[in-house]
């Protein structure tokens, strides 16, 4: 009888503990959703006047200015761009968290997109003494269907990080294609600072930076990779990383894509 009573007491205690954990979990979820909503509202409210500030600064830049004034306006525009980037990150992040991110697929020319992306970062990389290279094997389909905006956003973020965290050497973008699974991969490999093994998985967590020191050195929110991985997963793919401290990192985006068949290449219909 004593043993049965003890068992009952233990079961009751366990149930109470479970209930409490569940309630705590729900409270944490509600608090987290409230935090996301708050961030989204604040970011939205800041973005509107910020856009007005940027329009005015851009107009001012086009007026006749002496070199010192021009330099000050450029500082204003650069800082504004950073701020708008942060606001957009927070807004994208809350949209994904709330399950409201919608994808819009379209046909894109993979080679074209990647060439423009590399061109966009070339100057910045060269200024740091870093070479940019693009490797596209011949067997890659020309036109695929993906969400162009989000595809570009993920790769822009990977390139921005690769250039930001590489002080010498090169950044190589390599495209791969697996016809059997219809998966396209884009790897961005750098010869930069690298990420310690115990921080590797954490770089995909929101507001995380691999090394607290990099926040002060390079700025950033720690949201870019979180957004990128979630977008890749929304598209049915994934984003992963390999890295060795002091040698560099490779971020690999993998996406299942539909190959768009060029109308000109389709066999002619034979009417009988
Ligand atoms: P942030 O806006 O802070 O750059 P990200 O989510 O893009 O946020 O990156 C998170 C962290 O991951 C960075 O702060 C940095 O510590 C690390 N990281 C990302 N990419 C690289 C890279 N190519 N090389 C070294 N560290 C990187």
Image (spheres, rainbow, N blue to C red):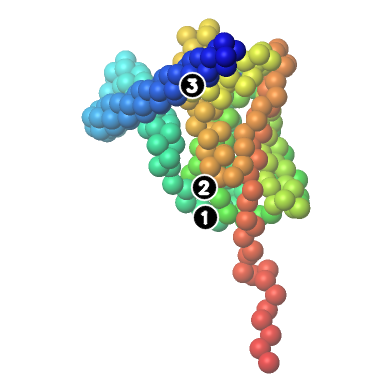
Question: For mark 1, does the 10 Å Cα neighbourhood hold few (<14), some (14 to 19), or many (20 or more) residues?
Answer: few
Q: Residue at x 70, y 37 (%)?
A: 174
| Marks 1 and 2 close (CB-CB < 8 Å) | yes
Q: Position of residue 72 (x, y in %)?
A: 32, 17
Give the SS element for disc 1: strand
Q: CA distance from mark 1 to mark 2?
A: 7 Å
Quadrant assignment for the C terminus: bottom right
Q: CA distance from mark 2 to mark 3?
A: 50 Å
Q: Position of residue 65 (x, y in %)?
A: 27, 23
Q: How many marks?
A: 3
Nearer to the camera, 149 or 126:
149
Mark 1, residue position: 106
Give the SS element for disc 2: helix
Mark 3, residue position: 15
Quadrant assignment for the N terminus: top right
Nearer to the camera, 246 or 28:
28
**In the visual, does 83 lie left or right of 209?**
left
Mark 2, residue position: 148
Q: CA distance from mark 1 to mark 3?
A: 52 Å
Which numbered dot is residue 9?
Answer: none
Q: Nearer the viewer, mark 1 or mark 3?
A: 3
**In the visual, does 93 lie left or right of 107?**
left
Question: For mark 3, does the 10 Å Cα neighbourhood hold few (<14), some (14 to 19), or many (20 or more) residues?
Answer: few
């Amino acid at each position: 009888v004593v043993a049965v009573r003890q068992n009952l007491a233990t079961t009751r205690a366990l149930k109470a503990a479970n209930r409490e954990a569940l309630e705590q979990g729900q409270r944490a979820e509600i608090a987290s959703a409230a935090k996301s909503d708050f961030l989204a509202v604040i970011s939205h409210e800041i973005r509107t006047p910020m856009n007005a500030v940027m329009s005015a600064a851009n107009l001012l830049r086009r007026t006749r200015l002496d070199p010192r004034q021009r330099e000050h306006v450029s500082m204003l525009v650069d800082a504004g761009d950073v701020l708008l980037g942060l606001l957009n990150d927070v807004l994208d992040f809350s949209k994904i968290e709330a399950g409201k991110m919608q994808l819009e697929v379209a046909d894109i020319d993979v080679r074209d997109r990647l060439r423009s992306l590399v061109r966009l970062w070339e100057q910045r990389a060269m200024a740091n003494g870093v070479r940019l290279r693009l490797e596209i094997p011949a067997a890659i389909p020309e036109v695929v269907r993906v969400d162009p905006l989000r595809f570009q956003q993920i790769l822009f973020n990977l390139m921005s990080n690769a250039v930001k965290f590489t002080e010498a050497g090169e950044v190589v973008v390599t495209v791969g294609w697996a016809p059997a699974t219809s998966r396209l991969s884009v790897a961005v490999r750098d010869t930069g600072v690298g990420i310690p093994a115990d921080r590797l998985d954490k770089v995909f967590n929101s507001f995380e930076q691999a090394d607290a020191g990099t926040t002060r050195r390079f700025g950033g929110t720690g949201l870019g990779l979180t957004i990128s991985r979630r977008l890749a997963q929304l598209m049915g793919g994934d984003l992963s990383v390999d890295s060795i401290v002091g040698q560099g990192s490779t971020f690999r985006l993998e996406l299942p894509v539909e190959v768009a068949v060029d109308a000109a290449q389709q066999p002619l219909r034979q009417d009988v």
